[in-house]
Each structure stands twice: as C-alpha cells, then as structure tokens.
Image (spheres, helix red, strand yellow):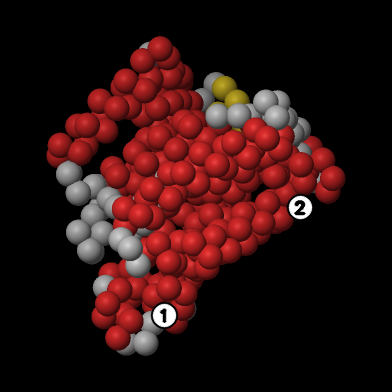
Amino acid sequence: MQTAALAVVGGLLYGCTLLLVATGLTLIFGVGRVVNFAHGTLYALGAFLGASIHAAAGLWAACLLAPALVAAAAVALDLLVVRRLRRHGEMAVLLFTFGLGIVIDAGITGIWGARSFTVPVPSALSGGVPLFGGQVSIYSIALAAASLAATGLLVAVLHGTSFGLRLRAASENPATAEIAGVDVDLAFTAVLAVGSAFAALAGVLVLPLVGASNGMDLTVTVLVFIVVIVGGLGSLPGTALASLLVGVILTLGATYASSAAYLVLFAAVIGMLLLRPFGLVPSRTE
C-alpha cells in the first residue's frame, strides 16, 4: 500500500512536468489548429541550452534565458516561414514542423555532440520529504509547483485580460474573431512563443533530475501527444487532467510491471478513447 501511494505521488509530480510541456502544445493547436511535431525537440533544446547557460551563470539564469531564446527563435520562424505556410493549409505546417524537429535534433547533436550533461540539484532544494514510509524529492515537489504556477499564470491571463479574451476568440472561431478586429496571426505568434517557452522551461527544470542527453525528446513527445489527445484537442482543462492521469498510470506501471509500463499506459489510453473519443474534456470547437 505504501509503495502504491508513493508511486501515485511520484506520478502526480511527473504529470505536472508533462503538463508544462503539453500546455504549450495544446495552446498552439487551440489557436492555430497546428499540430507542432517539433514541440518535443524544443523541450530537448531547452535542456541543452539550459545546461550550457547553467555552466556559465547558474540554473536560475538558465530558467530565464533558455525559454526566452527558444521563444525568440519560434517567433522568428513564425514570421519568416510558418505564417506563410498556414495560408496553404494545415498539412503544409505539419510537414514543416516534422522536418523542423529532425533539423533541431541534428543541430543539437552537431553543437553539443553525443554527450550527456548533468546539473546538480540546487542546495536549497536538495534532500527529501518523508512520506508513506519513503522519501519524496524536494526538488521534484518544487518542479511540480513551478509547473502548476506557470500554467496557472497562463490560465489567469487567458481568462482575466483583454488579450486573453482575444486569444480565446481566435481559438473558438478565427474567422469571426478576425471580423471583430482580432489579429489572428498575432494571436498565433503569441501562443507559439509562449508554448515554445513552456517546452524549453520544462527541459531546463528537469536537468537536475534527468540531465540533458540525445534522444531525450522522444519519450516526452510520445507522452505529450498522448496527453493532448486523451485530454481533448485544444482543451486546457483536459490537458491538465490527462497529464496527471498519464503520469500516475505510467508510474504505477513502472512500479508493478516495469517491463510493460508503456503497454499498460497504451491499454489505458485505448480504453479512455473508446469511452471518450473526443477526449476527457473536449474543447468547445469539437
């Protein structure tokens, strides 16, 4: 029982990390109806940039600078390429982001090589908290809190500001929003920047736990797409619920059937989609 309780706690904490990455992907799809296949590689890029910045200026500087650099690159790509491709349909953007992910992966290998980078846990957040007869990492708790805080701030902006109202209008009905004076292209650029920054921030925050290594984006990409689909495409509440569920199911599977953890997860996902084919909390546009 204690083992199961610790696994659930660990799954919830891991789910919060997935939430930070998946929120960005959900936001981008919600406003632009763009499936960003490069999103997972932005997570890896954030981790590698964060490792380099950490070596020069520390982890907290990395948490600020790496997401800012990734967001700036995303804005530049949108203005130079993606905005034009969106006029040719969703498939053109999808193929571009798929290719972009491959290019970013190759760029990471070309710049940082086939090495892994580790970052120590900040001394103020080292150690663990006794719980259910075991220990829960203080840093993992802090990471989950940071993820929830960032997501909560985004929700506050979306529902408490006029800019957020414009973003939600662009998400629910872009054509009507444009007639009402909403700059849909600017709205998409904004959410692309925020979503990319969230992915990069998640990559930086996990450095003390898993480090930065080639291919680290592959598992996260699969899990994040599962989260977004199970939660409901474009649905932030669904993304939050699905992130926690996926984290718990995966951790319980790893605890009791380590060799079949992903098989357990995929079976659960299939069951959820059979019961809720449009997701746990479908968006209003479904």
Q: Measuring 30% from the left and 61% from the top, which residue is drawn there? A: 89
Helix, strand or loop for disc 1: loop
Residue 222: quadrant of the picture: top left
Q: Mark 1 — residue?
A: 183
SS label for mark 2: helix
Residue at (53%, 65%) from the top-left corner? Answer: 80
Instruction: Choose between 164 and 96: the one closer to the eye.
Output: 96
- The residue that disc 2 covers is 61
Q: Point out residue 214 in the picture as x, y percentages from the top left corner.
A: 60, 29
Q: Sequence-wise, which precedes: disc 1 or disc 2?
A: 2
Q: Quadrant of residue 269?
A: top left
Q: Which image quarter holds the N terminus?
A: top left
Q: Residues within 10 Å of mark 2 (few under 14, many from 20)?
A: few
Q: Residues within 10 Å of mark 1 (few under 14, many from 20)?
A: some
242 left or right, relative to 77: left
Q: Residue type at mark 1?
A: Asp
Which is closer to the viewer, label 1 or label 2? 1
Q: Is residue 80 above or below residue 266?
A: below
Vertical arrangement, residue 264 with respect to residue 72, above or below: above
Disc 2 marks which amino acid? Ala
Along the line of sight, which residue is nearer the eye, 93 or 215? Answer: 93
Seen as rendered, the residue at the extreme right is 56
